[in-house]
Amino acid sequence: MIEPVTPLLTDLYQLNMMQAYLDHGETRVAVFEFFVRKLPPGRGFLIAAGLEQALDYLEQVSFLPEEIDWLQETGRFSAKALEAFAAFRFTGHVHAMSEGTVFFPNEPILRVIAPLPEAQLVETRLINILHFQSLIAAKAARMVLAAQGRQLIDFGLRRAHGAEAGLMAARASYIAGFAGTATILAERLYGIPTFGTMAHSFVQAHDDETTAFEAFARSRPKNLTLLIDTYDTEAGAHKVVALAPKLRAAGIAIRGVRLDSGELADLAKKVRRILDAGGLKDVAILASGGLDEHAIAALLGAGAPIDGFGVGTALTTSSDVPALDCAYKLQEYAGLARRKRSAGKATWPGRKQVWRQYDEDGRMCGDVISVETDHQPGEPLIEQVMHEGRRTGPRTSLADIRVRAARDIARLPERLRQLQPRTEYAVRVGDALVRLTAEVDRRLEEGESNKHG
Amino acid sequence: MIEPVTPLLTDLYQLNMMQAYLDHGETRVAVFEFFVRKLPPGRGFLIAAGLEQALDYLEQVSFLPEEIDWLQETGRFSAKALEAFAAFRFTGHVHAMSEGTVFFPNEPILRVIAPLPEAQLVETRLINILHFQSLIAAKAARMVLAAQGRQLIDFGLRRAHGAEAGLMAARASYIAGFAGTATILAERLYGIPTFGTMAHSFVQAHDDETTAFEAFARSRPKNLTLLIDTYDTEAGAHKVVALAPKLRAAGIAIRGVRLDSGELADLAKKVRRILDAGGLKDVAILASGGLDEHAIAALLGAGAPIDGFGVGTALTTSSDVPALDCAYKLQEYAGLARRKRSAGKATWPGRKQVWRQYDEDGRMCGDVISVETDHQPGEPLIEQVMHEGRRTGPRTSLADIRVRAARDIARLPERLRQLQPRTEYAVRVGDALVRLTAEVDRRLEEGESNKHG
């Protein structure tokens, strides 16, 4: 199994708190929301992703009998807690933004409504799932904007942070508009199109490049892309031209060449000229090798005739910003709104909705966050997706999620579509939410003064 | 299963190349080595980690029958290739540095010797495993050096890039000297000690902080650490002092308090004074919240009385350097040394060994990389760990790996133990390796001139 559903994939304190909640009967309904606190430098927007995996987790999460035995052996937990662990299933409701939706700081993208111990136990893994895919979808969207319609392919599995990161980065980047991935397991699990060329080792294993190209072409004639930079890129291009007639005679068309090192803008121009002069105008040039959105923009800005990009490390690690400042916070318990007031980490209390407004051109022009009953003009972005531990509807297809993301990216204000966003999107906090926050603070302060008075 | 062993966790091109190799009988013995090309800014050394997972993978990797069926359905592969996939097992030899060994650029930490298609297919996942753990072990070692003996705990699962990243970061940081992790599954799978405190939501779910502290203490009296920054840190410390006698009467000792926000140096001093004045000199202060090695060094430099640190995002994402420039490259095929000469990515050919020398104080004072038969003075770092697809010896315990890392970190030259390393470690390339490289180049050039001549 690639997406583990064991509740042991959590912080020890969640189990400790679960026992404490059970001991003290603190099992009333809690409301938690997941949101990003602020945008990292250089990001103008984020894209919600990971909801399907989060819902899979919530539908399936439970302790195996051997896990309960192991917890018992640790000697840490009471018999009552172990019984509760054994019986644990997620029975709550979930409200969320659709995957593929553009979102901004302080806007919840997921709300859990469940008995407190359940809502608490799932915290760590829910954050782990939602944070990473949303992070990567936003990074990928920047690359999509920079590539101006050229094909983008995820090459990042090898440097992704583990297996799941590689798979989820393939999924998140596909949502954001990538054409596909090199990771074949992502095709099997998620139906994401896969693309593959050849490696330097293939060329090196043959006595010369032409022999390697021909051997590969005869075995793998479909979508044939030859890697031409193992020894000398221009010489590699000339070999492709020389080989093409022989392959054509065998019914094999060269679809593309890949450049993976060197000064890519300059080499792409030279290779284009060599290919064109050799009658290979239809052969595409794919570039790879340490690329990110800035490198893509610079290559296209320099007029490099590149038709597609393979992007690895910068995508799957979101290399400039490998994490978002995000949180899953208690907003209500036992019918009362709650908030955290820690320095720099204060939160807006209660169950919230986000309404989005569009201008006459259909561009986003402002969001309002308020308590969910404080209806505002615009499109409400959060809707119920799970009831009593079960999805409320069918699984959303990756194709539909991709359409949603493309729609939202197209609707972004132009100044947020720049690699260096020159503005912040307007997100207003509704009056009812401001009033609720003041009420929560008043209650906390009265509680304290009653204690001390 | 947390560590997937399906060969589909790879790039499509590996399967394409495998078919091409089979078609052309290119199944002779290949030698690949994994190494890091250069150190990222701010890193003076790296620590080898992930070998146990790499060997587990190589011992277990094989296609499931349903995966072969699926590959057949894609229509991409010949019957001969599908047969070979179905029969695929890794039958090669592996040489490697022990986990926990300090290493430097261009030094192979793993060598695979296997029939070319096997050695090729496992490339992506081997890099994926070795890169991430080595990356995190190096980051964690920096924190260990900065913390000057204070306890470090991994809090990073929630912002790690997926489940496996969280688990492997717990393992890699433990190797580098962390005391343990909050991730309970890492205790179950790897025997890593776990630590847990309490969350803000626990405090928020109660009507006041003191009630929350007491409830938690009564349910979870062992290793009791109270989180005191939910509303006001100093007020929280006073509540701990006020509560302590009542808990003591119930036989419960407060072990520590945790600060997770605000100006930690200043707050730690104030909290220390409040605790000391309240007779709680033995209560430790644990700090967390966005810490990295620089923040830890600054806090200790400012004299903050902090006894331990919980480190999350900066550790599990290696936030300043979320990836290393590393590669798994063909160094020999069919008895002939090979190299890649791509711009900026040229490699040293052949099967290599690394010899390390120590000065009279036992500090590392220089490595030599050369062909493995070119014996040099010093400690050879690479040894055989797998023969024909099976480990040559018992699994190395995490405790032993940890000892090795501690030994190596202690033996680092002082100037590499700084957060801003002020020197580069001396790694010399042996004469025999220089000669072999020249021979490979001559052979490549002769091959080309014969073709063109």
Image: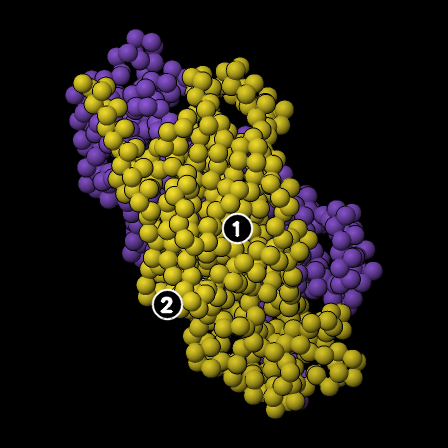
Chain colours: A purple, B yellow
Question: What residue is drawn where x is 29% and y is 42%?
Answer: B434
Q: Chain of mark 2?
A: B
Residue placed most toward the observer, B416 or A333: B416
Mark seen at residue B98: 1
Q: Which chain does the numbered disc 1 sit on?
A: B
Residue A222 lies, in percent from the top left, at 39, 18
Disc 2 residue type (three-letter): Arg
Query: For the point 64% across and 89% down, which residue is it?
Result: B278
Q: Can residue B214 be spotted in the picture? A: yes
Secondary structure at badge 1 equals loop
Label 2, label 1: how far apart the Cα atoms are? 24 Å
If the image is split into quadrants, where does the N terminus of chain A sit? top right
Q: Is residue A43 in view from this perspective?
A: no
Q: Indicate whether B90 appears above or below A432.
A: above
Residue A335 on image: x %, y %: 68, 64
Give residue B218's position: percent from left, percent from top.
Answer: 76, 73
- The total of numbered circles placed on residues is 2
* Residue type for callout 1: Ser
Left or right of B130 on screen, residue A339:
right
Mark 2 lies on residue: B415
